[in-house]
Structures are given as structure tokens and as C-alpha cells.
Amino acid sequence: MKDRHLAWRGSHNARDLGGLPVVGAGATARGAIVRSDSLQNLEARGWEEVEAYGVRTVIDLRNENEIGADVSPRPASIETVNIPLDVTEARDFWEAWGHGPQFATPLYYGPHLERFPERSAQVVRAIATAPPGGVVFHCQGGRDRAGQISMLVLALAGVEPEAIAADYALSDERLRPLYLSRGEEDEAPKIAAYLRDQGTTARDLIVELLDELDIEATLIGAGLEHGDVTALRRRLGVASG
């Protein structure tokens, strides 16, 4: 899966969601949907690379207070849409989940989908119905919020759960240089230790959630339409069954 990494100048954790095995047969199409860390730090060369890759829509999952000025101007051919995934105004939820290592893990995916399924449905619909061209969605580091949306998108496309979990794990190695460049401690070992203390792993949390939760029914019940699911699968080159 390492060949899916995209070395856009100024990004650290961008990768194509193509080339992943679909249950039954086949694989997701490349060049259609990309997950990433924040594109805010892209250099001019980085935006040229994004544009040359065929990307025409960027979906920013960050909260308003996380968004700053771009290092370099975005090409006019690329539209940016901001859909904050967190729902920070729900203070009771974030008092429990917004502090400590549990937020930097898939532990909160299930509770978030139970409490705010409409926000995930809105993001998935924006990806599915975006204009022709590639779509990038990103948060800050590209691991957790982007990981949740990646899980949903790939599950709707029929990607094997183990492959979805393996894709999530790739962020650990990709973010290490980012932490080093900032003089910060690599969070991955601390997060893994925390999950061990909880008797689980990131892989187990994702695979178990996908086994327990009907992703399509959950998002359809939250505003996603059946036509959106068909459009998403078509975008990823997966036949609707």
C-alpha cells in the first residue's frame, strides 16, 4: 500500500484511496479520492502537484479556529469546501472525548457516529457528489477525522475491513517526520500504549466497528441518499451491487 503515498510538497500524510481490495473482486480506482493532512502548508509546487493529480475539490474537515492562512495560493481550478466534522458546540460530548489520548484513536468513532451521524453523512455526500475530478478530504494531521471519513467511504465502497484498518495504520509512519520537524514527540507509541491499556488496538477497533455497525444504513438514516452511495461507488470505480 505504500505506493499510494503522495509526496506533495508541504504535505506529510497524503495518500490515494485507490488500489484497495474490494470484497468479492477488484479494487478501488486510483486518482479519485485522497485522504490527507492539512493542505494549508502546501508550497506553490505542492499545489501544482495537487492540480496535476487531477484534484478539483478539497473538503476541509477542520473547525474554524484551526484554519489559518495558506502558505501559497490555491489554484483557481480547485474548490474548497469546509465541513467541520467535530460538532464542537456539543460541549458534553467533547468534555468526555476531547481531552486525553482517546480522541487520537478510533475509540471515539462509534460514539461520534451514534451522536452526530448527520455530519459524517454530509461529508460523504459532498465527496460523492463533487464535480468531476479528484477529491481530497483532510483534517489537521490526516489521521483521526480523516481516518473516520476514510473508514466510511471505503466501507461503503465494499473495501475489506482489514484493508481499511491497515490504511489507518499507515498514518503512524507518515506523521513521524512531521513531529520531528516540529520538535515534538511522536504520538504513535503513546497512543498504542494507551490502547493496550484499554485491551484493544486501532486495528481491532476499526474491524469490530465495521462488523457491528451497518455503515450504509446509519448514514442513510442521517441524510445520505441511496443515489449518493451509488455515486460514491462509481467515483471509486466500484460496481453497485
Image (cartoon, helix red, strand yellow):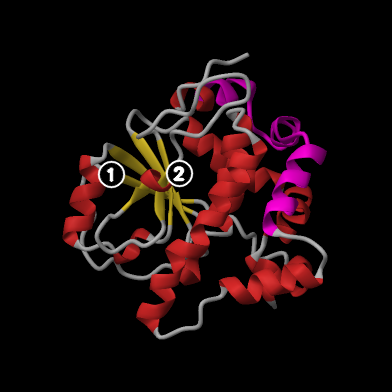
The numbered dot on residue 78 is 1
Is residue 200 visible in the rendered image? The answer is yes
Q: Secondary structure at mark 1?
A: loop
Residue named by callout 2: 1
Counting residues from the start of the chain, the first of labels 2 and 1 encountered is 2
- Say if the magenta span includes residue 15: no
Percent position of residue 127, x then y:
48, 37
- Camera-side residue: 181 or 221? 181
Q: Amino acid at mark 2?
A: Met
Residue 69 image position (x, y, % from top left):
31, 69
Report the Cα–Cα distance between label 2 and label 1: 27 Å
Residue, x 30% and y 39% (percent of image)? 56
Name the mark on residue 3: none
Q: Secondary structure at mark 2?
A: loop
CB within 8 Å, label 2 to label 1? no
Decide: is 100 above or below 122.
below
Q: Residue 13 in the image: x percent, y percent?
A: 41, 58
Where's the N terminus, which quadrant? top left
23 over 120 or under it: above or below:
above
Q: Nearer the viewer, mark 2 or mark 1?
A: 2
Relative image position of residue 200 (x, y in whole percent) = 78, 61
Pointer 2 local density, CA inside 10 Å: few below 14, some 14–19, many at least 20: some
Q: Is residue 78 left or right of residue 192?
A: left
- Queried whether the magenta region covers residue 227, the answer comes back as yes
Instruction: Tell me the amino acid under the disc marked 1.
Output: Ile
Magenta segment range?
Answer: 202-231
Q: Main secondary structure of the magenta part?
A: helix
Residue 149 visible? The answer is no
Q: Residue furthest bottom?
A: 183
